[in-house]
Amino acid sequence: MKQEKISGSIRNNIQIDSEVEIVQKNHQRSGELTKGFVKRILTNSQKHPHGIKVMLVTGEVGRVKWVLD
């Protein structure tokens, strides 16, 4: 079954323990994605054009590009 990708720019799409693909600050130019599970949601607003900022369980911080379903 193919994984469905949901936009990471809307906060309601993201829950604690969601599997996501993020872009870390140091990878913004390359667009390199890091896959992991959400530990904390760091953005308070409901939407962000570059993605909601989260912390993964590994401690990595970045903006969510895709929520994996």
Image: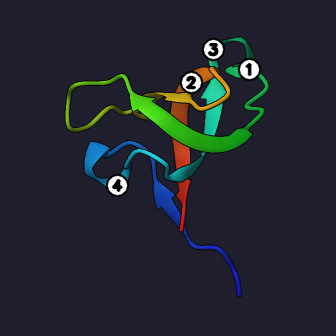
Look at 41% across and 44% down and name the residue there.
16
Counting residues from the start of the chain, the first of labels 4 and 2 encountered is 4
Query: Where does label 4 land, which residue?
Result: 13
Q: Nearer the viewer, mark 4 or mark 3?
A: 4
Query: Where does label 3 land, which residue?
Result: 25
Crowding at mark 3 (Cα within 10 Å: few <14, some 14-19, many 20+) = few
- Looking at the image, do the residues carrying marks 1 and 2 touch, with CB atoms under 8 Å apart? yes
Alpha-carbon distance for marks 4 and 2? 16 Å
Under circle 4, the secondary element is helix
| Residue closest to the far top | 26
Q: Front-most of 54 and 48?
A: 54
Alpha-carbon distance for marks 4 and 3? 21 Å
Counting residues from the start of the chain, the first of labels 1 and 4 encountered is 4
x and y percent of residue 10 in the render?
31, 46
Look at 46% across and 28% down and name the residue there.
54
- Looking at the image, do the residues carrying marks 2 and 3 touch, with CB atoms under 8 Å apart? yes
- Looking at the image, do the residues carrying marks 3 and 1 touch, with CB atoms under 8 Å apart? yes
Q: Which mark is residue 65?
A: none
- Looking at the image, do the residues carrying marks 4 and 2 touch, with CB atoms under 8 Å apart? no
| Residue closest to the far bottom | 1
Q: Front-most of 35 and 26?
A: 35
Q: Nearer the viewer, mark 1 or mark 2?
A: 2
Q: Amino acid at mark 1?
A: His
Query: Where does label 1 land, which residue?
Result: 27
| Residue closest to the far left | 45
Query: Where does label 2 land, which residue?
Result: 62
Q: Amino acid at mark 2?
A: Gly
Q: Is residue 9 left or right of residue 20?
A: left
Q: Considering only vertical position in the picture, is 67 above or below 34?
A: below
